[in-house]
Amino acid sequence: MKLYYKVMTRSNLPPLSLHVPEPQARPGAEPDFSHVIICPAGETPRPDPSDAAAIIRDQAFGLVRVLDEAGQAVGPWNPRLAPDTLRVMLRDMARTRAFDDRMFRAQRQGKTSFYMKCTGEEAVSVAQAHALDRDDMCFPSYRQQGLLIARGCPLVEMMNQIYSNRADRLKGKQLPIMYGFPDYGFFTLSGNLTTQLPQAVGWAMASASKADTRIAAAWCGEGSTAEGDFHAAMTFATVYRAPVIINIVNNQWAISSFAGFAGGEATTFAARALGYGVAGLRVDGNDTLAVYAATQWAAERARTNHGPTLIEHVTYRVEGHSTSDDPSAYRPAREASGWPLGDPVDRLKAHLEGLGEWDEARHDTMLTEVMAEVKAAQKAAESNGILGHGLHQPLETLFEDVFAEEPWHLREQTEQMLAERKRKWPER
């Protein structure tokens, strides 16, 4: 009788239905960015870096912007950078873009197996590299090559890794573009998404426990915030007030699915900070000055023991996810040109021109110079070999750099492998 009563009382309810997120537009349709919340430049308030996370909730729903539509720097987040600094950042972004273009072509020419461009997202990594201290440790995802370029990493070294050649410092053990440059504060990349976030939090906790002054920063895409590692990192970061900046690069698309499948329809990604009691900022990721200012704010917060910050960078992935991806299969062909926040290089260029500190002739000269620099680096790297053209690393290096102390069974296997090679090819 009790069970019958429950069934009867639900008879007037509609059947349950499941919501499946749908992108705003599919291939063949007109691009639609009406869902992107864009606040006027200068409108979002700048709290003090020491303010409690509970009283700065609105910043997770606004949009930190400095450059307005005329290219003028306005509002409380204006970092008031010197023109020389702005020119260096512009050059770093142009160098990153030129590097991407040449390495993309190298992959298409069969010189390497894989590449991932960051076109349209250069402001995120370059501006953050300038806002962080040189010895802060970065735990990047696979679209932050601008960090290395802005920190002065030799382009030849990066290309050697992409080609997995004999000068590759990682000895061919990593997928191309998964660099490892600890001497440039760049933790070795992992292809498993978001694993770097708990690592960054752990590094930051270790830095604090040793009374160091260095902080950590980590990057992931909006899609991988659905991974468990993201939430584990946020829990440890808030519990121990780790001096870390967690960056979500919301470029609207994972490899073939849009941001809605990671929860982007329900709220902003910056709002994920609120449930953890972490400060959250939502930033115009194509505004170099806004990215710099937000990172500087978060770094000061971390260095003064006020805890972690989560920054959502609202940007757009102009190219495919990688050279293995065809974005025309899942998004409108003209979507990139319709992105309402523009191009980061063009916007910073316009700002410098408005200050009277730049012009078209100097810009063209700079582009020529950086393209020549990248071309020369490519020629030097290819002199060390390209992927697939011979064995660039000795076979005995196969098991090196895997364990702190190589176990006996791997030493035994190495000896067996070398003996077999000598038997088959004595001349080698």
Image (cartoon, rainbow, N blue to C red):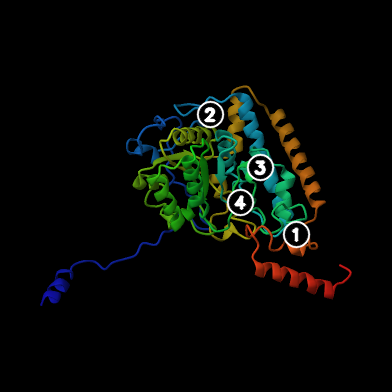
Q: Residues within 10 Å of mark 2 (few under 14, many from 20)?
A: few
> From this viewpoint, is residue 363 visible?
yes
Of circles 3 and 2, which is in front? 3
Q: Is residue 330 above or below residue 238?
A: below
Q: In the picture provided, is 274 more to the left or to the right than 282? A: left
Of circles 4 and 3, which is in front? 4
Query: Amino acid type of disc 1?
Result: Leu
| Marked residue nearer the N-terminal end (1 or 4) | 4
Q: Are marks 1 and 2 in contact (CB under 8 Å)?
A: no
Residue under label 1, please give it. 387
State the image coordinates of residue 380 (x, y, percent, origin top left): 80, 47
For label 1, the SS is loop
Image quarter of the C terminus: bottom right
Residue under label 3, please give it. 96
> In the image, what residue occupies the spot 47% across and 47% down?
33
Q: In the picture provided, is 297 more to the left or to the right than 55? A: right
Residue at the far right: name it.
427
| Marked residue nearer the N-terminal end (2 or 4) | 2
Q: Are marks 1 and 3 in contact (CB under 8 Å)?
A: no
The answer for how far apart the CA atoms under marks 4 and 3 are is 19 Å
Query: Amino acid type of disc 3?
Result: Thr
Q: In the picture provided, is 277 more to the left or to the right than 183? A: left
State the image coordinates of residue 162 (x, y, percent, origin top left): 70, 53
Q: Residues within 10 Å of mark 1 (few under 14, many from 20)?
A: many
> From this viewpoint, is residue 251 visible?
no
Q: Are marks 3 and 2 in contact (CB under 8 Å)?
A: no
The answer for how far apart the CA atoms under marks 1 and 2 are is 46 Å
Query: Amino acid type of disc 4?
Result: Thr
Residue under label 4, please give it. 188
For label 4, the SS is loop
> In the image, what residue occupies the spot 75% across and 36% down?
368
